[in-house]
Image (cartoon, rainbow, N blue to C red):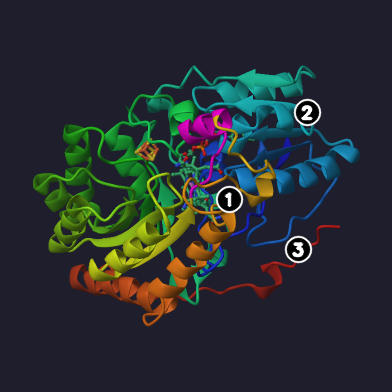
Amino acid sequence: MKMQLIYPEWIKLEHQTVFHLPPHAPVVVASALPDYVDVHFFDENVQAIEYDSSYDIVAISVLLTCQIKRAFEIADKYRKQGIPVIFGGIAVMLHAQEVMEHADSVFLGEVEDGRLEAVLDDFKNGKLKKVYNYMHDHPDTNTIYSARRDILNNDLYAYRGIQMVDLVHASRGCKFNCFPCCNNFLGGANFRPRPIDMVIKEMEGIKNNRLFIVDNSLAQDKQWVMDLFREMIPLKKKWVSHPILYDDEVLKLAADAGCWYVYQAIADTSDTIKERIERLHDHGIGVEGTILLGTDEQDEDYIKRLIDFLMEVNLDMAEFTILTPFPESPIRNKFEKQGRILHNNWSDYTCDKVVFKPKHVTPEKLQELYHLAWNTFYADGGQQTKMGSLFYKVIQKEIKDGTYRRYNPKIKRSFRKKLNKS
Ligand code: B12
Ligand code: SF4
């Protein structure tokens, strides 16, 4: 069975340096495909899709809400040629009703434990169902095998000759339920760790020395996270992640296991945030602040003070985003009740556009403050310079432990984006 697996294009944040990370869900999905499937992967963010009517089935993986419209265009084009299209991924779970109109089959949930195989068996037997709903039935994490990174063209994921990160995950789910986040709906409210030996085996098999551990939070189970870090030490990988438990014992182990920097959500100017950043730096771990603008606590002065604060606390990098009420998030629920959603043009749900009525400022003012935040923070450092400093730090670490490898991608220009969307 010949399958084309597609990851549609999505628009990056305005102001952010554009680089592309290798997609994660598609390589995880590929590892759950039965042997008889001959899979051809296209990441539209870095290469043009080769439309080809010889595929038996097209599978589209959609991560972000802002990818959904493009995913529909691709599906419609294939379906017009009579080729069946199956959809899956996070944004598919969040927009299931709309997706149905553009799909032959919609898969909701996670594919492991033989689920994808069963779907493809149905397809082979001419019995493909319109919906496969596993939203409330999560697979055993023992059945999550090493992702199939062999389907990626790695040369397409370097930035100016610098090797970026490979994505990997050690757990699913999140026991927290933060207001802007839809993870509770997506992955269930429980922390679901993968067996550590399987994670280590997967990491060991990744050629790239630099990883992004995409787990929602490494602050959910102290014992598990310490066990994981201990096992990671011999691998000598260098990695970035979402927040790690703020505990000196854990942070020390994280640093020993190669933690390069973490994403730290920042929405206020509290001493707690300041101390966290200092503590991470004390352990030699960098910090990229992810700063959410437009919460109900913030007025214009607050946002300006927040920007000043970020300059004082010596962040390595900052990523500003505008609060966005994604489907199935607690904040959307609240804004819907209060009549504060401006529109549902999903292509604008990119986190750099105001799509709701802020409490203390107009939407236009919030948009202006978003630009001000980026322009002020990067006024004298420059984004590439700060990014360069972070990479300098990792290179220093790699030279020290002998893992540094000069990366020399043979970037095939012919593969580079020449999108033909007609
Ligand atoms: C990694 C990640 C990213 C990476 C993506 C890198 C890449 N190249 O793909 C990066 C860092 C770029 C990113 C960016 C953003 N992200 Co993000 N990200 C994630 C994260 C943490 C992990 C995704 C992941 O890999 N999961 C693990 C995989 C294995 O699970 P999965 O994707 O669900 O796949 C399973 C199923 O869905 C299914 N499946 C998937 N595809 C398919 C296809 C088929 C055919 C089938 C049958 C099944 C199937 O099977 C898979 C295996 O079981 C998620 C949260 C999460 N926990 O999932 C947020 C998440 C997706 N991100 C989110 C957001 C908000 C963003 C941003 C928009 C804002 C921000 N600052 O975070 C930005 C983009 C801003 C911009 N416009 O520039 C939101 C989604 C909101 C939305 N509705 O769009 C999430 C859910 C986090 C949250 N806090 O709510 N993100
Ligand atoms: S924001 Fe992070 S910690 Fe909070 S619920 Fe979402 S994934 Fe969990």
| The C terminus, quarter of image | bottom right
Q: Nearer the viewer, residue 323 or 122?
A: 323
Question: Which three-letter amino acid code belongs to the residue tagged 1?
Answer: Ile
Residue ranking furthest to the bottom: 380
Q: Is residue 353 magenta?
A: no
Residues under labels 2 and 3: Cα distance?
A: 25 Å
**Residue 44 occupies quadrant:** bottom right
Q: Earlier in the sequence, mark 2 or mark 1?
A: 2
Q: Residues within 10 Å of mark 2 (few under 14, many from 20)?
A: many
Residues under labels 2 and 1: Cα distance?
A: 24 Å
Q: Is residue 380 left or right of residue 147?
A: left
Identify the residue at image location x=20%, y=58%: 274
Q: Over which residues does the magenta segment extend? A: 323-337
Q: Earlier in the sequence, mark 2 or mark 3?
A: 2
Q: Secondary structure at mark 3?
A: loop
Q: Nearer the viewer, mark 2 or mark 1?
A: 2
Q: Is residue 335 magenta?
A: yes
Q: Earlier in the sequence, mark 1 or mark 3?
A: 1
Check if mark 2's residue and mark 3's residue have beta carbons within 8 Å: no
Q: Mark on residue 151? A: 1
Residue ranking furthest to the left: 249
Q: Secondary structure at mark 2?
A: loop
Q: Nearer the viewer, residue 181 or 355?
A: 355
Question: Which three-letter amino acid code belongs to the residue tagged 2?
Answer: Asp
Identify the residue at image location x=67%, y=41%: 344
Q: Residues within 10 Å of mark 1 (few under 14, many from 20)?
A: some
Q: Nearer the viewer, residue 283 or 327?
A: 327
Q: Secondary structure at mark 1?
A: helix
Identify the residue at image location x=41%, y=36%: 179
* Total marks in image: 3
Which residue is denoted by mark 2 in the rendering? 104
| The N terminus, quarter of image | top right
